[in-house]
Every structure is written in C-alpha cells, then in structure tokens.
Amino acid sequence: MKRRRDMEVESTEITIGIEELSMMKLIKVKLIKHDQQQTALNLVANHDDDKDYNYHIPTMPFLSISNLVLQVLDKIGPTMAVLRQDIFQNIQKLEKVHDSDPALYSNMVEILKKEIISEGKGTKCSKTCCKALLWLTRSLDFTLALLQLLADDLERNMVQAVQESYTNTLKPWHGWISSAAFKVALKLVPESKGLITILKGKDKNNDDFKKELRTFISLLTPLLKEIHDVLGAYGLDMLKST
C-alpha cells in the first residue's frame, strides 16, 4: 500500500497523461473518410443510426486529458490564465451534458449529434458543446506544440517556445482581442529551467523526461487528428473567435 502511495506521489501530469492515452488506444475509433462528409451530415439530419456512421471519442478520458492540461498551464503561471479559464469552462459544459446521461454521452460524438439535431445544420456554430470540443481540441494543439518544442530542446527559451506554439495553433483562430490579450500575457512566461524542473518531477533526469514527453506526444497526436477529422466532418473546424 505504501509503495502504491509513493508511485502516486511521483506521478506527474505527463505520466498520468500517458496512462490515460494508452487506455484510450484500446478503444477503436472509426472515422468516416473525407468524401463521406455530406453523407454523414445527412444521416444526422435524418436521425439515421446507420452502422457506417460510427465515430467514437470517449468523453471522460478526453476530458481527463484536458484537465491535465489545466494543471500544466497552472505551472506555466498567470500568463496562461485566460486560456486556462477558457479550458475550464469548456470542460464544465461537456461534463454537464455527459452527466445528464452518462451511458449515452460516454461517446463525445453523441453530444455533438444532440446539438446538431436539435439546432439544425447551420454553418454558424452557436452550439455550446460543439464550440467547447473545438476549443478544447485547439488548446490541446497548443499544448502539444509547446511540449514538442521542449522535447526537442529543454533549454529552449520559454517565451519563444510559447510564442511559436501560439502562432502555429491558436493565433489563426483568434480575433484581435484574444491576440492582444496573449501579447500581454506573454510577458509573464516563466523561465524554462524552473518550469522543466516542476514538470518532470523529482528524481528524474532530463533524458528520461524527454523520452516521457515524446511518448506522450506520440499518443496525443493521433487522437487530436481523429478529433479534427470529426470536427471537419461536422463543418465545425473553421470557427474563429472575436
């Protein structure tokens, strides 16, 4: 029992994330091809449960990964406060719907279908949960990009790493207000050495930590690709903020 507690204490967000993502790999995710997108939308509109329309994104494991991102952002510091609040609110929105019917909404796609069926197929996504999944996915894109830069070079300047990650992931979807807020927050980014020390945990050398980061990245990358494919099939992937 003591050994189990010790292992839990030694766990970091990255190691827990690896465990969560490894479990998610056991669930086979079936995605329709790009040329079937219109068929998929028609199936949803007709409330058709055709066997070929079989997306599956496990809701709670995905939200668990998103919660780990919150913990990582907490360690980066107040510079990520706005992004952190956005992630937290989006997690709450999806959890609320999931908890209303855990069996049905164990699949995230069922939550999207519920909104699309009830609100119609409008190209302007006013759909709360659709937006929540979209922006959670983009936040994970940002996190993945940042961790990739750190895995390549733990000594990389953190301000530059955050700036580059933001430019390649979130910035294309942000309006001028969000972009301006990020520029202000960037001034509060901590130095690389302090953040790496916190993230890797005690008694772990840099080489082991980099291997850990690469394992996490290799597991998260295909999941995000699958979710982007789902969002694209529903016509939700081009939404921008103000």
Image (cartoon, rainbow, N blue to C red):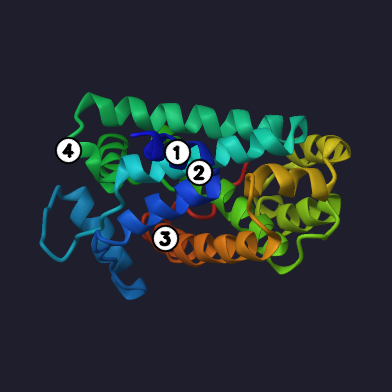
Quarter residue 61 falls in: top left
Quarter residue 126 falls in: top left
Image height of 44 relative to 228, above or below: above
1 vs 4, front mark:
1
Mark 1 or mark 3, which is nearer the start of the sequence?
1
Q: Amino acid at mark 1?
A: Glu
Is label 2 in contact with label 3 (beta carbons under 8 Å)?
no
Tell me if mark 3 has few (under 14), some (14-19) or many (20+) residues whose alpha carbon lies within 10 angstroms of its own: some
Q: Amino acid at mark 4?
A: Leu
- Name the residue tied to disc 4: 104
- Name the residue tied to disc 1: 8
- Name the residue tied to disc 2: 11
Tell me if mark 1 has few (under 14), some (14-19) or many (20+) residues whose alpha carbon lies within 10 angstroms of its own: few
Q: In the image as oriented, which residue stretches furthest toward the right?
A: 187
Mark 4, secondary structure of its residue = helix
Image height of 85 relative to 152, above or below: above
Tell me if mark 4 has few (under 14), some (14-19) or many (20+) residues whose alpha carbon lies within 10 angstroms of its own: few
The CA span between labels 3 and 1 is 25 Å
The CA span between labels 2 and 4 is 32 Å
The CA span between labels 2 and 3 is 22 Å
* Residue at horizontal 69 percent and vertical 54 percent from the top: 172
> Which residue is at the front of the view, 172 or 28?
28
